[in-house]
C-alpha cells in the first residue's frame, strides 16, 4: 500500500474543504472497497479523509419516505424496521450481499461507489481501461477468439472499452425503488436519481458515476412505494452465500383492481455495466395481466439488446429466468422457492 | 456537474503539503486502542490495519490473517459490539471504541460457554479460522437477534470460511449455546 | 480414574482449549526480537525472461534492509527430489538464480524491511520489464506438444498398465461406455497462509525455522539443501507445532522458506515471511487439471469385461510432479481386461503438488461417473452394479492376493439402508418438490493404506504423568489427541495425565503428515514405547523410552481402504442452482481411534468433495497465463450455508493384517468419489450428465 496521510473530517463542509485542498485524496468510510483496492495498488491516494464522524449515520422517516445518512451501515439499513416493512426489496438485496462482518462495516454511501470486481481491474499487472485508460480490456481479450476470463462480466451496457459488471446488490434494489442520492459540494447540494447516478462505460470507463471530484454523497432517499406494492430481490450465485451475483433481479409492482400491473419497476444485477433498470421489461408489463407469457415477454425484452461474450452467454437465459422467477413469486408467492 | 476524474480513477502520488505534518508520508502517528477493556497507546504507520495492529504491535495473535481482503472472516473481532473484518479497516480509524478479540473471551482454564461448546462439538480442526468463528458466534448470540432456524445460523455464519469443513460442528455448538441460554437455570422458577 | 475404552471414544481434542482461545501459536504468529519482514516480488508474466529490474526506488524506500534479486541473491541450490529420504522439495529448482520466467507469480525478488507495511510497499516499487512469450496454459493444446511424456510409474505403481486384452474384450461387450471427463485446477487454500520465520544464532552455527510444515523432518533436510548447509556443521531446527491446514500444500518444502533463511543470514536478524493469499496460487502447489477418457465394456447386466482409463494431465516447466490419477482404477473392480495410460504435459503454471487424495480424487470422479453411466445404460441399480463387479481379491494380482480387510459390501448395504436408497427416483428428472428436482447418486471411495517408520519418545513421571514427543504433526487431524489416547490406554492413565509435543525436528523423527499415514505410523511407536514403560509405571518410578518402529513390511495382503458415498441433491434447473440436501458416507478404514475427530475429518473430506463437485476451479487468463482467481472471493469453496445433512458412519472393524493398530487412516478417503456421488445425483435429478467439473449454474443451463 502506498503511504498516505490520514485526516479525520469533522463535518461535511470540513470534508469537502479538505478534499478541495488535496486533489486525488479519497474519502474513507467503511473502507471495505477502498482499503482492498489500496492493498492491490489500484487506488493510491496521497491523503485519506476519514468521513465516519460527520453525523451522517441516522435514518429518519417523513411523509415522503425515508432519509438515510450516507454512513448508515449496510446492516443498519437492512435491519431497519421501516425498511424491512416498507422496502423489503432493499433489505433483501443488502442481506444477499457479502457477509455480516462486511455489511457491518460497509456504508450506504460507500456501496454506491463499490469498486468493480473484474479480475483485470483488480490486477495492476493486467490491461484495464477502467483502471488505466488506454491499456485495453483484459476481459475482452488481447486477440479475437481468445477472450479473457469474463464469465462474471456484463451482457448489457458494455462497450468495447469495458465489459465489467456492476457488483452491487443494494444498488439494484435502489434503482427499483426510485431512490435518490443526496450529493453535496462546496457550492450546493443536489439530488440525483439512483438510476442515472451510474455511468455506462462508453469510451470513458474510468468514470463510474455522476459524482464530481469536489462532491460527496451525504445520503439517500427512499420515496414511499405505491400503496399495495410488492417487492422482491432474488440473486443467483456460485455458492449459497458470500458470492457475487451471476444474475439478480429486483422488482416492485402493484396490481390494479382488475388484476393488471399498474406500477412496475424492474432492475437487474450481475448482467449490466451499471445497476440495470429495464424500461423495456417495464413497458411490456405495465397494464398487462400478470401472466407467465407476459413475464416471459418482459424478460426477453429486457435482454433484447444483450451482447454475450465468450464465457458469459449463459447470463442472458439465466437473467431472463431470474426475472421471470421474481415476477412469479410476487404474484404467486412461495411456489417452491426454498428447497 | 460533470468531472471526468471521479471515484476509482487511478491517481498518482499527491503532494500533501496542505495537510500539515512533518517527515515522510508513512511517518508513524500516535493512536490509542481499547482492546478487551484495556487502553493501549501505540505509534503506527497510518497504513497499519486494525488486524496488523492487534497482531504485530499489541501481540494479540489469536486474531488471524487468512486473506487480508475481507474474504474469509479469520480476522473477525468485535468493534462497538459489531463483528467486523479487522483486515479491512485501519487501526487509526478505530480509536477510542471498545474492541474485543478472542483473547478477551476466556482463557484455556476459564473458557467462555461458546468456547466450551466448540470443543464439545468439535467445531474446528486446524483451529486457524476458529478465533474468527467464535467472535462471529459471540456477536450472533450476544449482540444480534439470535438465529431461529439452522438455515439462518448457516447463512449468518457464512462470512467465516473454514477449509477443514468444521461447519457441522460449528452449527451444533451454536445451537447448544443458544438453547442453553433459553432454558431457565435449574432451580429457578420458569 | 482408569480409562475404559479410550481407544475409539469421541474424546475432546486435547489442544482444543489452546485453539478456541487463540492461544495456539502458528508459524505466522511467531514474533522475535529485532525481527524484520520479507515480501516476495513475483513475476506478472507466465513465460519469458526478465529484461531488467529496477530496484532503485525500493532500495531507497524507508525502512528497507535489502532487496534481493538475481543480481545479488546468494547461490541457492535445488532442494531435493527424494521422498524416501525425506528431502523432497515442491519444485527441484530455485528462484533468483537465472532470468527465465516459467510461470505466473514466480519469485523474482525478495524485499525485507523493518515493518510489514514498508516491505509490501517496497516490493511494489520494484519495476521489472520482461521479454515475454505466449505461455502454454491450455491442457488440451499442451497434450499435443512434443514434450509430453508417458511416465512409467507413480508412487512405485505402474501408470502404463495392461492386463488381459482390452480391445478384444471390448468387441465382445454388449454395452459400452466411452466418455471423456475433465477436472479443473484446484488450490488447497488452507486458511493459514504459508509462512516462515527464520532465526540464525549469532555465530551462524544454528538456524531455527518456524514453518508451516506437514513434514518438519523433510523441511529441515530440503531447506538445508537449498541453502547449501551441511547439517553436520550447522544445526537446523524446524518447528510447526500448530498448522492451519495444509491438505498437501505444506508437505514438500518450497523455495520461499529458504529465501527467508537466506535473508536472515544476510541481515543477521530474524526474518518473517508470510505469503499473501494471491501468492498462494503460484508458490505452493495445486491439483492439476485432468482430461480422462474412460471406456467400459460389459455384459447386458453390467458385469465388466473391459476397462480403459487414459489420463492426460500436466506438470510445470521446472519440476516433474505426477498426479497419479489412474491407479485406483486398476483395483476398484474385478475386470480381467484392463488398461491404464498416462500422458504428462508441461505447462507454464506453478508446480502442482499432492492435494488431499492426489490421483484418486480426480480419478474416481471419472471412473465413478462412468460406472453410473454404465448403470443407467444397463438399467442396473448403481449399487448392484458395484456389487456385481465386486473385487473379492486384489485384481492387480490376477485376483489372487487377499485384501488385509475389506468391508465394502457392508458399506454398500449399510448405505442402501440408512440412506433410503430403495426410495430413489428410478428415472432421471422424475421427482420434484416445487421447483426443485430431486435426485440420488452414489459412488465408491478408495484410498491405499500405508505407514512408515516413526520414532517416539515417551517419558513418565513418578506421579503418573506421561509426555509423548515426536516430530509428527497435527494439521487439525487430531494427532495430539489420538497419541495421548494411545499412551493413556497403554499406561492406564486418564488422557488428562498425558501430554504431547509434536512437529519439532529436535524430537524423534516422525513421518510426513500426508497420505493418511500418521496414526498408522506413529501410533505403534507410542504403544511400543509405553509398553517399555509399564515396569516403571508399575513401580511408580519415572522413566523414559525412545523407540523406532519400521513401517509395515509386505505381508501378502493388499492394504486398501474403501467407502460408499450417497448424495441427495436438489436442483432448481431454471436458475441452475444445486443444493446438496443430504450426504451419507460409510467408510471402512479399520479401527477408529477417536470417533469425534475421525467424524470431523471425514466431514471435511466430504465438504471438499462437494466443493469440487459444485464450485472449485482456478482460472488462468488464456493469453497471459496469469491466475485470475487468486483470492477467496473468486476461488469459491463451500461456506457454512452450502453444507447440511451430512452423516458419517464407520464400519470400525480393526484390520487384522495392517499394522498393530488395525487402523488404516482416513484423511484422504472421504474426498475420493464424493464429487462423483454429487454429479451422479445431479444426473438422477435432471437427466443432465455433467462430465466437466465443477457443476456451475451455467453448466445446468447449457445442458438443460
Image (spheres, coloured by chain):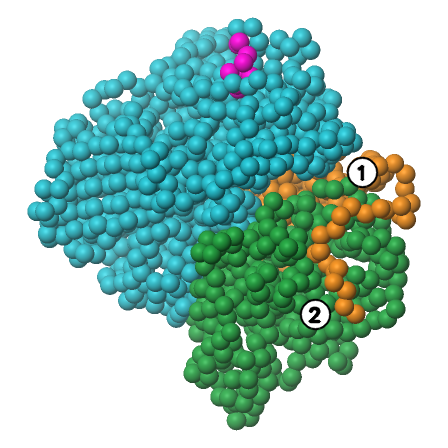
User: Where residue A156 appears, x then y in whole percent?
Assistant: 54, 69
Q: Residues within 10 Å of mark 1 (few under 14, many from 20)?
A: some
User: Where residue B121 appears, x then y in whole percent?
Assistant: 50, 42
Q: Is residue A139 left or right of residue C516?
A: right
Picture residue at 84% right of the left edge, 56% below the top: A19
Picture residue at 30% right of the left edge, 44% below the top: C292
Colour chosen for chain B: orange
Quadrant in the picture for the C terminus of chain B: bottom right
Q: Is residue C119 left or right of residue A150?
A: right
Could you say which is closer to the camera, residue C340 or residue B18?
B18
Q: Residue furthest bottom?
A: A258
User: Where residue A270 appears, x then y in whole percent?
Assistant: 55, 64
Picture residue at 57% right of the left edge, 10% below the top: C235
Colour cyan, chain: C
Is C229 magenta? The answer is yes
Q: CA distance from mark 2 to mark 1?
A: 35 Å
Q: Which residues are magenta?
A: C223-231
Amino acid at each position: 500500500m502506498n503511504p498516505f496521510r490520514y485526516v479525520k473530517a469533522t463535518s461535511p463542509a470540513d470534508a469537502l474543504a479538505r478534499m478541495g485542498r488535496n486533489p486525488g485524496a479519497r474519502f474513507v468510510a467503511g473502507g471495505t472497497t477502498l482499503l482492498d483496492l489500496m492493498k492491490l495498488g489500484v487506488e493510491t491516494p496521497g491523503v485519506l479523509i476519514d468521513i465516519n464522524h460527520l453525523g451522517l449515520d441516522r435514518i429518519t422517516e417523513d411523509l415522503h419516505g425515508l432519509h438515510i445518512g450516507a454512513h448508515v451501515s449496510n446492516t443498519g439499513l437492512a435491519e431497519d424496521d421501516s425498511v424491512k416493512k416498507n422496502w423489503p426489496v432493499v433489505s433483501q438485496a443488502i442481506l444477499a450481499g457479502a457477509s455480516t462482518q462486511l455489511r457491518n462495516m460497509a456504508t450506504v454511501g460507500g456501496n454506491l461507489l463499490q469498486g468493480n470486481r473484474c479480475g483485470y481491474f483488480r490486477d495492476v499487472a493486467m490491461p484495464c481501461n477502467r483502471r488505466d485508460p488506454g491499456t485495453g480490456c483484459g476481459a475482452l481479450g488481447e486477440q479475437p477468439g481468445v477472450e479473457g476470463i469474463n464469465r462474471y462480466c456484463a451482457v448489457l451496457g458494455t462497450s468495447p472499452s469495458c465489459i465489467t459488471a456492476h457488483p452491487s446488490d443494494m444498488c439494484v434494489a435502489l434503482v427499483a425503488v426510485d431512490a435518490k442520492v443526496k450529493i453535496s459540494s462546496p457550492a450546493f447540494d443536489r439530488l440525483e436519481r439512483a438510476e442515472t447516478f451510474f455511468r455506462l462505460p462508453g469510451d470513458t470507463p474510468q468514470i463510474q458515476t455522476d459524482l464530481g471530484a469536489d462532491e460527496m454523497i451525504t445520503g439517500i432517499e427512499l420515496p414511499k412505494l405505491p400503496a399495495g406494492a410488492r417487492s422482491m430481490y432474488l440473486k443467483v450465485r456460485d455458492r449459497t452465500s458470500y458470492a457475487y451475483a451471476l444474475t439478480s433481479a429486483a422488482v416492485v409492482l402493484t396490481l390494479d383492481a382488475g388484476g393488471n400491473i399498474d406500477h412496475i419497476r424492474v432492475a437487474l444485477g450481475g448482467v449490466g455495466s451499471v445497476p440495470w433498470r429495464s424500461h423495456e421489461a417495464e413497458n411490456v408489463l405495465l397494464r398487462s395481466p400478470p401472466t407467465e407469457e407476459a413475464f416471459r415477454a418482459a424478460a426477453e425484452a429486457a435482454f433484447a439488446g444483450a451482447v454475450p461474450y465468450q464465457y458469459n452467454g449463459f447470463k442472458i437465459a439465466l437473467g431472463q429466468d431470474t426475472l421471470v422467477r421474481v415476477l412469479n413469486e410476487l404474484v404467486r408467492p412461495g411456489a417452491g422457492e426454498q428447497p | 456537474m460533470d468531472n471526468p476524474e471521479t471515484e476509482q480513477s487511478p491517481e498518482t502520488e499527491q503532494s500533501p503539503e496542505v495537510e500539515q505534518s512533518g517527515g515522510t508520508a508513512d511517518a508513524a502517528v500516535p493512536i490509542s486502542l481499547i482492546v478487551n477493556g484495556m487502553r493501549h497507546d501505540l505509534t503506527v504507520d497510518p497504513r497499519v490495519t486494525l488486524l496488523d495492529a492487534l497482531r504485530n504491535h499489541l501481540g494479540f495473535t489469536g486474531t488471524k490473517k487468512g486473506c487480508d481482503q475481507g474474504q474469509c472472516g479469520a480476522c473477525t473481532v468485535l468493534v462497538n459490539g459489531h463483528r467486523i473484518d479487522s483486515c479491512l479497516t485501519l487501526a487509526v480509524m478505530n480509536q477510542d471504541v471498545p474492541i474485543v478479540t478472542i483473547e478477551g473471551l476466556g482463557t484455556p482454564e476459564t473458557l467462555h460457554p461458546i468456547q466450551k461448546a466448540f470443543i464439545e462439538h468439535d467445531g474446528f480442526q486446524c483451529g486457524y479460522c476458529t478465533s474468527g468463528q467464535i467472535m462471529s458466534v459471540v456477536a450472533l448470540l450476544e449482540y444480534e437477534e439470535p438465529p431461529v432456524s439452522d438455515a439462518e445460523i448457516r447463512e449468518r455464519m457464512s462470512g467465516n470460511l473454514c477449509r477443514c469443513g468444521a461447519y457441522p460442528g460449528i452449527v451444533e455448538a451454536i445451537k447448544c449455546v443458544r438453547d442453553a441460554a433459553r432454558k431457565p437455570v435449574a432451580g429457578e422458577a420458569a | 480414574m482408569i480409562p475404559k475404552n479410550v481407544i475409539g471414544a469421541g474424546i475432546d481434542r486435547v489442544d482444543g482449549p489452546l485453539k478456541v482461545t487463540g492461544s495456539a501459536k502458528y508459524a505466522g504468529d511467531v514474533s522475535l526480537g529485532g525481527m524484520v519482514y520479507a515480501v516476495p516480488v513475483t513475476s506478472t508474466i507466465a513465460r519469458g525472461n526478465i529484461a531488467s529490474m529496477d530496484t532503485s526506488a525500493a532500495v531507497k524506500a524507508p525502512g528497507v534492509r535489502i532487496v534481493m534479486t538475481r543480481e545479488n541473491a546468494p547461490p541457492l541450490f535445488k532442494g531435493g527430489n527424494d521422498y524416501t529420504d525425506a528431502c523432497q522439495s515442491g519444485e527441484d529448482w530455485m528462484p533468483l538464480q537465472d532470468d527465465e520466467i516459467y510461470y505466473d507469480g514466480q519469485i523474482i525478488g525478495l524485499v525485507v524491511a523493518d515493518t510489514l507495511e514498508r516491505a509490501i510497499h517496497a516490493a511494489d516499487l520494484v519495476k521489472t520489464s520482461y521479454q515475454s512469450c505466449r505461455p502454454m496454459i491450455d491442457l488440451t493444446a499442451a497434450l499435443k506438444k512434443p514434450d509430453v511424456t508417458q511416465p512409467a510409474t507413480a508412487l512405485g505403481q505402474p501408470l502404463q498398465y495392461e492386463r488381459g486384452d482390452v480391445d478384444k474384450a471390448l468387441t465382445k461387450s454388449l454395452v459400452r461406455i466411452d466418455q471423456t471427463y475433465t477436472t479443473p485446477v484446484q488450490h488447497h487454500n488452507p486458511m493459514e497462509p504459508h509462512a516462515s520465520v527464520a532465526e540464525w544464532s549469532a555465530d551462524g552455527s544454528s538456524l531455527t525455522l518456524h514453518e508451516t510444515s506437514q513434514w518438519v523432518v523433510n523441511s529441515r533436510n530440503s531447506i538445508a539443501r537449498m541453502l547449501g548447509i551441511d547439517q553436520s556443521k550447522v544445526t537446523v531446527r524446524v518447528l510447526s507445532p500448530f498448522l492451519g491446514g495444509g491438505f498437501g500444500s505444506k508437505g514438500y518444502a518450497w523455495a520461499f522458506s529458504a529465501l527467508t533463511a537466506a535473508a536472515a543470514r544476510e541481515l543477521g536478524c530474524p526474518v518473517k515471511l508470510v505469503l499473501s493469499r494471491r501468492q498462494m496460487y503460484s508458490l505452493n502447489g495445486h491439483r492439476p487439471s485432468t482430461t480422462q477418457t474412460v471406456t467400459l465394456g460389459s455384459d447386458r447386466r453390467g458385469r465388466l469385461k473391459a476397462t480403459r482409463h487414459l489420463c492426460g494431465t500436466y506438470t510445470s516447466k521446472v519440476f516433474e510432479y505426477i498426479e497419479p490419477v489412474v491407479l485406483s482404477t486398476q483395483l476398484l473392480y474385478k475386470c480381467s481386461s484392463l488398461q491404464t495410460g498416462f500422458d504428462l504435459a508441461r505447462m507454464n503454471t506453478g508446480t502442482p503438488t499432492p492435494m488431499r487424495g492426489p490421483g484418486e480424487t480426480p480419478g474416481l470422479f471419472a471412473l465413478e461417473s462412468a460406472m453410473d453411466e454404465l448403470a443407467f445404460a444397463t438399467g442396473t441399480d448403481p449399487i448392484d452394479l458395484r456389487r456385481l463387479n465386486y473385487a473379492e481379491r486384489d485384481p492387480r494380482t490376477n485376483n489372487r492376493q487377499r485384501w488385509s480387510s475389506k468391508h465394502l459390501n457392508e458399506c454398500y448395504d449399510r448405505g442402501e439402508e440408512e440412506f433410503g436408497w430403495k426410495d430413489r427416483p428410478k428415472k432421471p428428472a422424475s421427482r420434484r418438490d416445487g421447483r426443485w428436482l430431486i435426485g440420488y447418486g452414489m459412488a465408491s471411495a478408495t484410498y491405499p493404506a500405508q505407514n512408515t517408520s516413526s520414532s517416539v519418545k515417551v517419558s513418565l513421571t513418578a506421579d503418573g504423568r506421561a509426555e509423548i514427543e515426536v516430530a509428527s504433526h497435527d494439521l487439525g487431524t487430531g494427532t495430539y489427541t489420538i497419541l495421548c489416547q494411545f499412551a493413556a490406554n497403554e499406561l492406564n492413565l486418564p488422557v488428562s495425565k498425558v501430554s504431547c509435543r509434536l512437529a519439532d525436528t529436535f524430537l524423534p523423527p516422525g513421518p510426513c503428515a500426508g497420505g493418511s499415514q500418521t496414526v498408522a505410523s506413529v501410533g505403534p511407536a507410542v504403544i511400543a514405547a509405553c509398553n517399555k514403560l509399564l515396569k516403571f509405571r508399575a513401580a511408580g518410578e519415572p522413566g523414559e523410552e525412545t523407540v523406532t518402529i519400521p513401517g509395515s513390511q509386505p505381508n501378502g495382503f493388499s492394504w486398501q481402504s474403501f467407502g460408499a458415498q450417497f448424495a441427495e441433491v436438489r436442483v432448481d434447473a431454471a436458475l441452475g442452482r444445486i443444493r446438496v440436501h443430504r450426504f451419507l458416507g460409510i467408510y471402512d478404514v479399520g479401527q477408529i481411534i477417536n470417533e469425534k475427530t475421525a467424524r470431523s475429518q471425514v466431514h471435511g473430506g466430504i465438504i471438499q468433495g462437494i466443493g469440487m463437485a459444485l464450485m472449485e476451479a482456478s482460472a488462468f487468463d488464456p493469453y497471459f497465463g496469469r491466475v485470475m482467481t487468486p483470492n477467496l472471493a473468486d476461488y469459491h469453496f463451500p461456506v457454512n450455508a452450502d453444507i447440511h445433512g451430512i452423516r458419517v458412519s464407520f464400519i470400525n472393524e480393526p484390520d487384522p493384517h495392517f499394522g498393530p493398530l488395525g487402523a488404516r487412516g482416513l484423511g484422504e478417503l472421504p474426498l475420493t468419489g464424493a464429487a462423483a456421488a454429487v454429479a451422479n445425483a445431479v444426473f438422477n435429478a435432471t437427466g443432465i450428465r455433467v462430465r466437466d467439473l465443477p457443476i456451475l449454474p451455467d453448466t445446468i443451463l447449457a445442458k438443460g
